[in-house]
Image: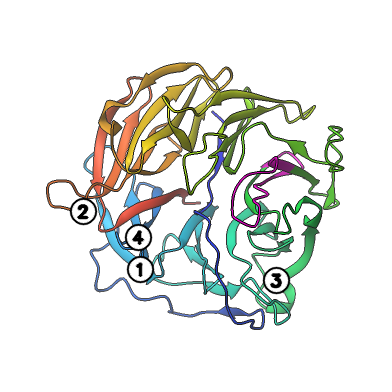
């Protein structure tokens, strides 16, 4: 099974004072785990979970070792702001803090209380926050840093030990501005030597009035590829669904792009688009509507199974199993019916993880629901201290 998932943090607008780009190599910083329960990662696979408090005033990372027996959260590591996300590469995970911080921290899973380094993703010439969103890896020495409220994505060297060596270059996406705003790069994924970046293209009122796009870059040359659609004077792939939030890939399926539609209302212009990465054709395979709900999350398990969450009312979602090639509905996860779903992710063992906010009471705590895709049944529930909003998986070398 080959599977790649990229899931960004939720977007918002922020301002900060400009500051110099810094890369600080840290020794023993980021907090010690001595005051927390010992974290046992002996199985070699760990779920890294970004969590936030119900009032969205604070956040932290919680770790869960995958095992056959009972699983439990490590408790909070690296307490910080609420606007955070996580991703992974090798045996490291990366904590992205957006909003006023706009910084990334690298953590080795075998030493989870310590940051190997931390850096900011803005320059002295920036007049506002770039709003860091995602870090997509080509190799140990090259990655792409998505900056949601900027016209450029950065090309960076995650192995660098100095600020001067960290920044390698930029991808210019300014052509995709819509309504005088930024192109709003929201997620990205690699397929071979091509980088696919989703662009929301929201207007000045943060509405998806313009067509959303996927821009494609050659990772060898960092030049944009003309996909041949010849629409709006742009080189990229115009999407049918609007306001893309995540993108996934599986060789037998191609690319799936999940579009939310309007976040601040219930404009149901979102859906799931399927892209052929070879000829760049695009087809909408599922659409949100007033009966089905607004599609907000996607997890691609394999060539025959994917899951999406559909919200009919705030805090009330349903998780559906779909055919990732046709969009046909194949079933529903009963354990998630009517729940406040904040995240979906596929783990390396081919299982679905659902981030459930609960109602923050002892009888209904937040946590992760682990689902067997063969039956759509829950096989584990792992309670978390805070509300789980983003999930990545790290496998030790």
Residue found at x 66% / y 83%: 20
Q: Position of residue 77 (x, y in %)?
A: 35, 66
Marks 4 and 1: in contact by CB < 8 Å? no
Residue 91 seen in the figure: no
Marks 2 and 3: in contact by CB < 8 Å? no
Compare marks 1 and 4 and give the one earlier in the sequence.
4
Residue 220, compared with residue 298, is above or below; it is below
Residue found at x 34% / y 56%: 63
- Check disc 1: other Cα within 10 Å, few if <14, some if 14-19, many if 20+: few
Compare marks 1 and 2 and give the one earlier in the sequence.
1
Disc ID at residue 57: 1
Q: Secondary structure at mark 4?
A: strand
| Quarter occupied by residue 155 | bottom right
Q: Which residue is mark 3?
A: 166
Q: Which residue is mark 2?
A: 360
Q: Secondary structure at mark 3?
A: helix
Whether the magenta-drawn stretch holds residue 194 is answered as: yes
Q: Secondary structure at mark 2?
A: loop
Compare marks 4 and 3 and give the one earlier in the sequence.
4
Residue 125, compared with residue 80, is above or below; it is below
Q: Position of residue 27 (x, y in %)?
A: 48, 80
Please give left or right for residue 234 compared with residue 318 in the image: right
Q: Distance of mark 4 from mark 2, alpha carbons?
A: 12 Å
Give whichever of 43, 182 is nearer the camera.
Answer: 182
Residue found at x 42% / y 23%: 321
What span is in magenta?
Answer: 190-214
Disc ID at residue 52: 4
Quarter in which the N terminus is drawn: top right
């Amino acid at each position: 099974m080959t599977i790649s998932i990229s899931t960004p943090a939720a977007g918002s607008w922020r301002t900060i004072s400009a500051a110099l780009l810094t890369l600080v190599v840290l020794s023993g910083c980021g907090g010690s785990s001595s005051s927390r329960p010992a974290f046992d990662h002996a199985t070699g696979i760990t779920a890294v979970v970004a969590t936030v408090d119900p009032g969205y005033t604070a956040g932290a990372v919680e770790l869960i070792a995958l095992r056959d027996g009972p699983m439990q959260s490590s408790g909070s590591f690296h307490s910080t702001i609420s606007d955070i996300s996580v991703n992974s590469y090798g045996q490291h995970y990366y904590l992205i803090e957006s909003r006023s911080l706009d910084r990334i921290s690298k953590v080795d899973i075998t030493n989870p209380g310590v940051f190997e380094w931390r850096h900011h993703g803005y320059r002295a010439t920036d007049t506002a926050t770039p709003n860091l969103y995602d870090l997509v890896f080509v190799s140990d020495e090259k990655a792409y840093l998505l900056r949601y409220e900027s016209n450029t994505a950065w090309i960076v060297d995650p192995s660098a030990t100095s600020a001067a060596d960290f920044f390698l270059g930029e991808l210019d996406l300014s052509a995709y501005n819509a309504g005088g705003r930024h192109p709003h790069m929201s997620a990205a994924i690699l397929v071979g030597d091509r980088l696919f970046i989703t662009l929301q293209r929201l207007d000045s009122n943060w509405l998806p009035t313009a067509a959303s796009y996927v821009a494609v870059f050659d990772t060898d040359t960092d030049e944009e590829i003309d996909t041949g659609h010849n629409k709006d004077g742009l080189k990229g792939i115009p999407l049918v669904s609007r306001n893309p939030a995540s993108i996934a890939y599986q060789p037998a399926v191609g690319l799936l792009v999940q579009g939310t539609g309007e976040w601040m209302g219930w404009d149901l212009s979102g859906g799931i688009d399927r892209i052929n990465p070879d000829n760049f054709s695009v087809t909408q395979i599922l659409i949100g509507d007033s009966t089905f709900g607004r599609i907000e999350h996607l997890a691609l398990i394999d060539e025959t199974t994917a899951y999406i969450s559909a919200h009919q009312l705030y805090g009330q979602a349903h998780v559906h199993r779909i055919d990732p090639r046709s969009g046909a509905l194949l079933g529903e996860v009963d354990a998630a019916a009517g729940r406040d779903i904040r995240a979906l992710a596929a783990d390396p063992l081919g299982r679905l993880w659902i981030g459930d906010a609960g109602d923050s009471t002892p009888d209904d705590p937040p946590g992760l629901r682990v689902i067997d895709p063969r039956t759509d049944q829950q096989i584990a529930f792992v309670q978390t201290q805070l509300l789980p909003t983003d999930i990545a998986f790290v496998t030790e070398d």
